[in-house]
Image (cartoon, grey):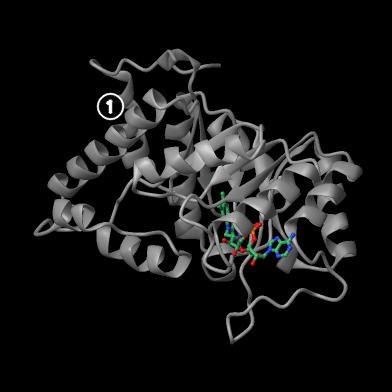
Amino acid sequence: MTASSVHLSFEIFPPKTAAAADVLHAALADLAALQGRFLSITSGAGGGTPGASAEHAISLGALARMPARPHLTCVQGSRGEIEATVTAYLDHGITQFVALRGDSPAPDGRYHPRADGFTFPDALVAALKGWGAADVAVGAYPEVHPEAPDEAACLAYLQAKVDAGADRILTQYCFETDTILRWRDRVVAAGIDVPIGVGIMPIGHFPQIKRFSERCGAGVPDWLARRFAGLEPGSPEAHAVAVEIAAEQCARLVAGGMTHLHVYTLNKSALTLALVRALEAEPLAFRWAA
Ligand SMILES: Cc1cc2nc3c(=O)[nH]c(=O)nc-3n(C[C@H](O)[C@H](O)[C@H](O)COP(=O)(O)OP(=O)(O)OC[C@H]3O[C@@H](n4cnc5c(N)ncnc54)[C@H](O)[C@@H]3O)c2cc1C
């Protein structure tokens, strides 16, 4: 595996305020230098931020000089509403998507499929392909999705999405690199043979990421907490540790055969830029695949 066969993509979420939009736009201008394969844009995540309209997605992608890849979730609407959203995207030339179940907006936190909607993401994938989507990515969980009874079931749900036409997999972030590589081996052994983009979460603010990880079921190992112990979140020291940890993980993933790194930017560019520059520098000397 040569580092030059690795490629990058980035995830953002639609900003809720004008001030947040300014921060995102500045970050996207920075990301434009990084030759990412696509810019994925969440929908409904992080407390119900709606997805970007087709025009908005196009403009965000243009700022980052990457094709926009909107996320779609089963919970975001009826079949008809989702079809109308996708038709608008396709009419604007957006043909790549991420198809997800989404988390329940219900007060009990449990997932209740809509009677008029897609029950699970495999059905959404099949519909997207039928409507003309060129490339559909789906989510996957190296640490097992919190609602899956076990890993075998989690892999079976992934297999169903690939059987429905998914073109690639994007993983939830996971701080234990060995866990990701062992999971990848089980995915391959199960005969799931679409490309995998590994989610990378550079840690901009450790307490915030810890809280977020508890909600989404990503483990925060003790060694990670120890690395940030005593460091002021946002300080140059914490930033340096975050870059070192993420770069170390990316290097190990690539050495382990992973070829696509999908960076969760949280709409900021400083850590992502520092990570990419650290990977490009000696001794790693990554060169990105176009
Ligand atoms: C890369 C990535 C991007 C994300 N972006 C967003 C976003 O933009 N908006 C958002 O709201 N959330 C987002 N999420 C979070 C995601 O929506 C939640 O983790 C959700 O709980 C699972 O979605 P999924 O499509 O990965 O589901 P899956 O892992 O496919 O399924 C989740 C659970 O649903 C059940 N299930 C799934 N398929 C079946 C089936 N065929 N039969 C029976 N049961 C089944 C199982 O209990 C399973 O554990 C993202 C996650 C990832 C990894």
Q: Which residue is mark 1?
A: 278
- Horizontal side of 219 relative to 29 (left or right) equals left
Mark 1 Cα shell of 10 Å, populated few (<14), some (14-19), many (≥20): some
| Quarter of the rendering occupied by the N terminus | top left
Q: Give the quadrant of residue 115.
A: bottom right
Q: Residue at x 54, y 71 (%)?
A: 47
- Horizontal side of 85 relative to 274 (left or right) equals right
Determine the quadrant in which ligand 1 lies.
bottom right
Q: Residue at x 85, y 42 (%)?
A: 129
Viewer can see residue 27: no
Q: Give the quadrant of residue 166.
A: top right
- Horizontal side of 52 relative to 109 (left or right) equals right
Query: Is the CB of the residue bearing disc 1 within 8 angstroms of ligand 1?
Result: no
Residue 78 pos. (x, y %): 84, 68
Q: Residue at x 59, y 86 (%)?
A: 107
Foreground: 279 or 54? 279
Does residue 79 lie above or below 179 as drawn? below
Residue 124 pos. (x, y %): 80, 55
Does residue 142 lie above or below 178 as drawn? below
Viewer can see residue 232: yes
Residue 94 pos. (x, y %): 76, 38
Q: Give the quadrant of residue 137.
A: top right
